[in-house]
Image (cartoon, coloured by chain):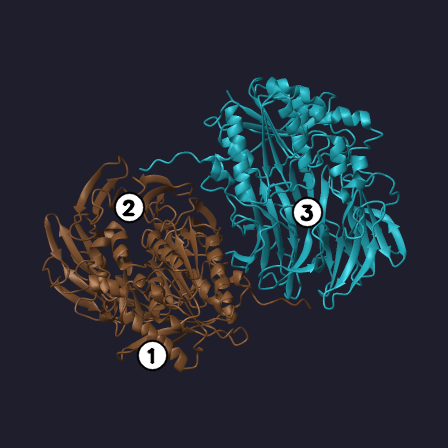
Chain colours: A cyan, B brown
Amino acid sequence: MIQFPKPTVEQFFRTYAITDFAVSKDEERLIFSTNLNGKMNLWAMDLPDTYPYLFAHREESCSFLKIDDKNRYVLAGFDKDGDENHQIYALPFEGGLPQDLVTGDSDEKYFYAKLSDDGERLYYITSKDNPSFMNTRMRHLSDGADTLIHQGEKSPTFLTAISKDEKAFVFIQMFANTYIKGIVKMGTETYELVPDPDKIHTVSDPVFIEDTVYFVTNYESEYSYVAKFDLKTKDFSEVLSIEKESITSVTYHKESHVFYVTTEHGVQDALYRFDLGSETTETIDIPADVIGKLHVAESGALYMLATSGTTPINIYYSETGADWKQLTNNNVLGVRNEDMVEPEVVSYTSYDGMEIEALLFKAHPENDNGHTIFWPHGGPQTAERKTYRSMFQAFLNRGYTIFAPNFRGSTGYGATFVTLVEQDWGEGPRLDCVAGIEWLFDKNITDRDKLFLVGGSYGGYMSLLLHGRHADYFKAVVDIFGPSDLFTFANSVPDHWKPIMERWIGDPVRDKERFIKDSPVTYLDGMVKPMLVIQGAKDPRVVKEESDQIVAKLEEAGRDVEYFVMEDEGHGFSKKENEIKVYTMMLDFLAKHQG
Amino acid sequence: MIQFPKPTVEQFFRTYAITDFAVSKDEERLIFSTNLNGKMNLWAMDLPDTYPYLFAHREESCSFLKIDDKNRYVLAGFDKDGDENHQIYALPFEGGLPQDLVTGDSDEKYFYAKLSDDGERLYYITSKDNPSFMNTRMRHLSDGADTLIHQGEKSPTFLTAISKDEKAFVFIQMFANTYIKGIVKMGTETYELVPDPDKIHTVSDPVFIEDTVYFVTNYESEYSYVAKFDLKTKDFSEVLSIEKESITSVTYHKESHVFYVTTEHGVQDALYRFDLGSETTETIDIPADVIGKLHVAESGALYMLATSGTTPINIYYSETGADWKQLTNNNVLGVRNEDMVEPEVVSYTSYDGMEIEALLFKAHPENDNGHTIFWPHGGPQTAERKTYRSMFQAFLNRGYTIFAPNFRGSTGYGATFVTLVEQDWGEGPRLDCVAGIEWLFDKNITDRDKLFLVGGSYGGYMSLLLHGRHADYFKAVVDIFGPSDLFTFANSVPDHWKPIMERWIGDPVRDKERFIKDSPVTYLDGMVKPMLVIQGAKDPRVVKEESDQIVAKLEEAGRDVEYFVMEDEGHGFSKKENEIKVYTMMLDFLAKHQG
């Protein structure tokens, strides 16, 4: 019969993103943000029918989605070409073109906070008049009247919960990714949610239930748990913790008085149902490894955005918490699951005895080209987890083995571990990478002369740094929008990031010596291997100058460096054709330097 | 609450095409050709789930789709940028990138004919070695062995049916759109399917049932009917006719021994079930007005591609012939059905007393801008019917009323009516248009100074001709790939069209006077109104020179003419962004000339 060749690299990129979704209160409409038609747009399905239709056309990434409880309108946030200056738009319930609702100058940010239960008042957070610390405001949708609710001070402050009577508010104040305070404000009174807020801790997902605020915190603990703050007694107490797992979100289902709790443990997630009455916890099986979003409908039905190492992100539905049904069908063009590579979870001992977990994706023997790609993840305070990456599966299909360590600073391994990258971007994490490389050699997974280095964002920074200090390990290096100089990087981040830079990176004056030591540009002389640098022109996080300057210097020094700037992208890929173009370019670059 | 403006023009174009579909024998997979993601590609759904996934990526129009009965592979035809040089490709059953199967030079055509029941032998028709009359060949898919089955002679000849034992074949021979012979070939014997093949008639949809060939014909009748030819006795006889309706297709369902018969009557279609045993006919309600394709599964379930004046094309499913379920959800972005305009079916008397039917789309009063667009349809041997046109509904929403007459030569009004455009492109049909325009004025539907003229293909030709000879009627004129000169047009059509040009247009030498009289270019002096000309650079039917020459001459004469060439399109729009660009341009052009 007809013989078909193996899947091509392009096929792996013919998946799409699903970044967010919302379900109408009556569960008759599900709206989601996806680049199904090539660019990010909103699509909808009228449940139980799952055939999607175009719901809003804007061709930009959506930052939030909220459907009015009475199905009168839909709110959505969009930025411009990934610049992250999100503003708030409204759409008819039937869909259409987004109309300006709460918008302003193109360099201001307007974040959605909450919509009142009656859909009349919109609470939002804006950089306007307070670019570093943010203001919280409330807009009456009927007459446009707009009032200041809270003026951020000291650090970026975000409204995250409102009591039913709209008289009590919970704000979170970000001092660092690892230090986030929660404050409850009732009239002129304010209270800290934890007993000693000066202790480093985080607060997230506050929810008002009568006279109590429930929230997620890691206060005095390695792992995040659910705690509560009694508004009457002002008492703080623990409600629920899960052994060796960090609670990442809590969603309250009023009708059954239960919490749906998501947790992370290392490279994957779990879901639990906690009954607030009986105080019992049950595990709910989930249809994939990593949860992107969980929505609990009034009916008790669950809607989940989830992915795994071999399955692109999809929306799943479960009426009861079992028998998940896949609502979307985002898969890889013509590639069967058995042609994908499921990652192995491995661990190795680093230079100082610390255990480091890593994902090892081994190319199938029939594809194996003998080369390994070392991939330091971005963040740095995130982790490489069991999520589908087109790049990984495409590169695996071309025969590359991929190794992605969760070096110190990664999330999912306790609160202390995450802090270990703070004010130490270039030492501990780098040595964890070096130990990982040596482990690959020791275990005969990789030959010493067959290693590539590829990373993006913090991973791009790490790639530059490893290249500058350990060039002998690598045949060639790819840097995707990585900071090249901590001095300039610290000055160029968005305004509302600046207050958290102190704990994250440190102070350029006080920590000058360390900034020099940890800046890739310091090791320019060491960067002797061929390099490909990718940058989005509109990137607001790692600005183009970070790449421009290192490329200019490498070119000046006569090094082999290719530079590609995507004019219409920010810190990531919003456009499918850009993504395919860049990864094809990367594959060509790697192929050229295999020899 | 939030106020939303009326839908914009762009929204009406945010639908997509669905041009074809195929269902696997087990009805577990439905594959369809659509530009859902912006460009034409194949998508699939795994029934009963209707969430579509990308099945094949090629970004070209698909000319046919066939799924192997044993689900081993899928065959599909693609051309290049609309050049209509279709070639045959194969795909794994899981989908992927189309692989060459029966292909050749880019200027050759390879049409799919039939696949043997066991999926081993592919019958196809090619222009290779016989560009005017076409050859039919058979390819063994296992070893690639390829044999000539039939050599076309005298006129383009296409294999359309094969007996179960693959020893008898039905070929149709096209002499004109209105003169298509059917020939059955058994070994060295050949028989005409009708008693006197010299009489003008058509044959289509032949099907072998044991020793009989059933087919659709209008032999000695105004309306097409189902007839049969007995292979043993060589007798011809009528099987089924429907009063005042033309049968357009017949699909045999072996398991129940019935025919599903589609008919056309004027601007809409109907569906019937004819039991070959009891010889009874029942009407089947259809979910829209015009049928694009009907598939009858082994189970008896029906799958239909269908559209109506206010509903874009969709795929519908019915298990039993009632209770249609819409499988796809192709709708207009944010526009409710009540915001669309359902056409009125009107008729008027033409210059010689002939009744002409027309569709009248009246702009809703709240949108009405007082102007009317006169739209002569393409073809010319087709008709303007109750199908969704983004252009119509968008222009209606901007306030234009649209009038589309089915002038003589249109299909759906009997066999004689269709022939009335043959060798008379510019007289009768033109005068029908003139009578339609006067009718619009008489009925006070349109003011004499508020009429625009827009047409494509033959409608573009008619627009040029009406402009040249009746410019006073119009404020401005849009010509979309219309032939401007019958002499050059007759010479530039695809090779396999040439044999049918004689009956269709006539002979440039013998009919020189008429060719001059009916060529728009003859009336260049009359074309004094502003004009917009649209052309696809790769158009194989009306080549770019047809537009180039008229534009050049108009420019030479100092006329107000705008010319837009789409470099990557043929005779139509395969790319959504081109479509929106062109129609936006047209709307701007019309708006500019309203004053």
- CA separation in Å, label 1 and label 2: 43 Å
Element on which disc 1 rests: strand
Q: Say if mark 2 contacts mark 3, CB within 8 Å.
A: no
The location of residue B91, given as percent across then percent down, is: 38, 42
Residue A225 visible in rendering:
no
- Position of A103 with respect to A181 (left or right) is left
Give amino acid for label 2: Lys
Query: Image height check: is B582 above or below A513?
Result: below
Element on which disc 3 rests: loop
User: Are both tags, 1 and 3, on one chain?
Assistant: no
Q: Say if mark 1 contacts mark 3, CB within 8 Å.
A: no
- Residue under circle 2? B109
- Residue under circle 3? A84
Residue name at image x 44 percent, y 79 percent: B445
Q: Chain of mark 2?
A: B
**Disc number for residue B348:** 1
Dot 1 crowding, Cα within 10 Å, few <14, some 14–19, many 20+: some
Q: Nearer the viewer, residue B541 or A219?
A: B541
The location of residue A349, given as percent across then percent down, is: 69, 22
Q: Chain of mark 3?
A: A
Element on which disc 2 rests: loop
Quadrant position of the N terminus of chain B in the picture: bottom right
The location of residue B565, given as percent across then percent down, is: 42, 52
Q: Nearer the viewer, residue B95 or A230?
A: B95
- CA separation in Å, label 1 and label 3: 60 Å
- Position of B28 with respect to A288 (left or right) is left
Q: State which mark lies toward you, 1 or 2.
A: 1
- Position of B308 with respect to B243 (left or right) is right
